[in-house]
Image: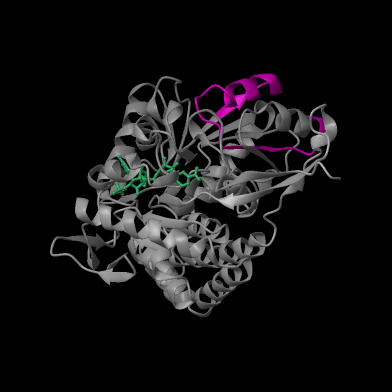
Amino acid sequence: MKMLLDGKWVDRDYKIDVCDPYDNSVIETVPSADKNDVELALKSAVAGFEITKRMTVYDRAQVLYKTAQIISNRLEEFATIIARESSKTIKEARKEARRCVNTITCSAEESKRILGETIPFDSFPGGEKRKGFYYRFPIGVILAITPFNDPLNLVAHKLGPAFAAGNSVILKPATVTPLSAIKLVEAMIEAGMPPQAIQVITGQGARIGDPLVTDDRVRMISFTGGVEAGKHIASIAGIKKIGMELGSDSPVIVWKDADLQLAVESCVSGAFWAAGQNCIGVQRLLIHRDIYEEFRAEFVKLTKTYKIGDKMKEETNMGPMITETEAIRVEQWVKEAVAKGARVLTGGGRTGALMEPTVMENVPPEVKVHCEEVFGPTVNLYPVNDLNAAIKEANSLPYGLLAAIFTRNIEVAFKAAYELDCGGVMINDSTDYRLDSMPFGGVKYSGLGREGLKFSLQEMTEPKVVCFNLPGM
Ligand code: NAP
């Protein structure tokens, strides 16, 4: 596949192999961009913004509606690309493709609701005779940097609202999963998006990241990825807007009055979706001591039914990790925990990139599977005695994306909702529940700003005040 630069699909001699992590077969190649390509992308994006900012809301919305229709018509094709290049099973990939249709459709809808307000200038002496308002204008070139784990929908979360608002975009997809992103852009161009409005540049972030991030022609960086890359980008970006969707170590409290079956099913799915490579994947389960043993037995029983292996088979529940190196990392983290006293209740083994779904208890606080984002198929169970202690434990780490609680007690639910330090609290769902149009983002190291169409549109526009001094009035 090719990159899209300056309105043309271009190739380069130096290429990157895109492999299926299940069997390491090469699916496709993409060009490896260099500094000249970065310059071309920047120049073209500036020219593209001159086009997009003049398009009517109607025209922008029509392009997005048509894009959604194209993806919907070719859902299986999109799902297959996702499943081949990423860790997702074909069933998980179909769900992501359906969500992408919704993300793009909602972006079109939200483009019609970018509103301003009148301003009461006469509310302070000196403002007499003045009338005015503010409206929101697009901010310009947006650099979108995306991760591997949702290679289609997380790209849609940036392209949809950026374009709905009238911006142009330079997209740098994850090097291991660029194909779904390129297919999405192909659909947008087919739907009528001006080609210069979007640049897709493929290549290593470590190589082409800095010249893109530091360039003043970029007015906003919308980054989704890990904390380390996020910190680096924030440290060199200079004066421009930054949106950061980073990692977490999602805590879920299971209170003594919880619907146990619901909690077990939601949390098993939430822990092992996309082989645990999920920013809202369940990592820490804080279970009331009265139901701990029953919950543990049911949780382990259901986990043991998981079929891992070939992503393209309908019956597979969980695929490989994105690379064998990543699976080795997770295996080592499990071994570290075991060496310090953790007990593996099921899993812990690895074959190539396939890491078994792993459940542990008695995990000491100093080990990596407790205090860092694992981003793999492991989950820790902890017994807790009281709600304050559970909330304190949930809040104890430097992340805060989503948290969750299972309870039938309204007061317990409200207390958790208000005291858990994070961007969202799910009641009677695991942390792995997200509606694409809800405000989504974190506190602490989990991020800056919010995504979720309407909220992304706020971040990707700025208010401009217009004030008329009308002395004759
Ligand atoms: P990553 O290694 O941080 O990479 C994310 C993106 O950043 C990739 O496109 C990567 O390019 C690029 N990148 C890396 N170093 C860069 C640099 N110095 N300058 C510019 N770009 C750079 O993350 P990942 O492994 O793909 O994704 C996993 C992480 O994403 C996890 O921490 C997860 O929690 C987080 N995530 C967060 C959300 C959310 O909404 N909060 C959603 C999904 C994932 P290359 O691929 O070329 O290295």
> In this picture, is 254 found above or below 46?
above
Q: Is residue 186 above or below residue 223?
A: below
Residue in view at x 39 percent, y 36 percent: 230
Q: Position of residue 166 (x, y in %)?
A: 54, 59
- Tell me, yes or no, whether the highlighted magenta stretch contains residue 276: no
Q: Can residue 311 be seen here? A: no
Which span is picked out in magenta?
Answer: 382-411
Q: Nearer the viewer, residue 383 or 445?
A: 445
Tell me residue 145's x, y (percent). Answer: 39, 49
Q: What is the residue that sits farthest to the bottom in this orientation?
A: 73
Total number of numbered labels?
Answer: 0
Q: Is residue 173 above or below residue 218?
A: below
In the rendered image, which quarter contains the N terminus? bottom left
The quadrant where residue 40 appears: bottom left
Task: Point out the residue furthest to the front here.
Answer: 472
**Where's residue 424, x and y in %?**
64, 39
Tell me if 53 is positioned left or right of 416 in this view: left
Q: Is residue 396 magenta?
A: yes
Tell me: residue 57, above or below residue 171: below
Q: Does residue 249 appear to the left or right of 196 in the view shown?
A: right
Query: Where ligand 1 lies, by image quadrant?
Result: top left
Q: Name, please, the residue furthest toward the left.
A: 13
Image side of residue 467 versus residue 211, left or right: right
Tell me where residue 90 appears, x and y as whole percent. 44, 67
Q: Which quadrant is the C terminus positioned in?
A: top right
The answer to whether residue 352 is seen in the rendering is yes
Residue at the image position 44 percent from the left and 26 percent from the top: 371
Render colour scheme: one colour
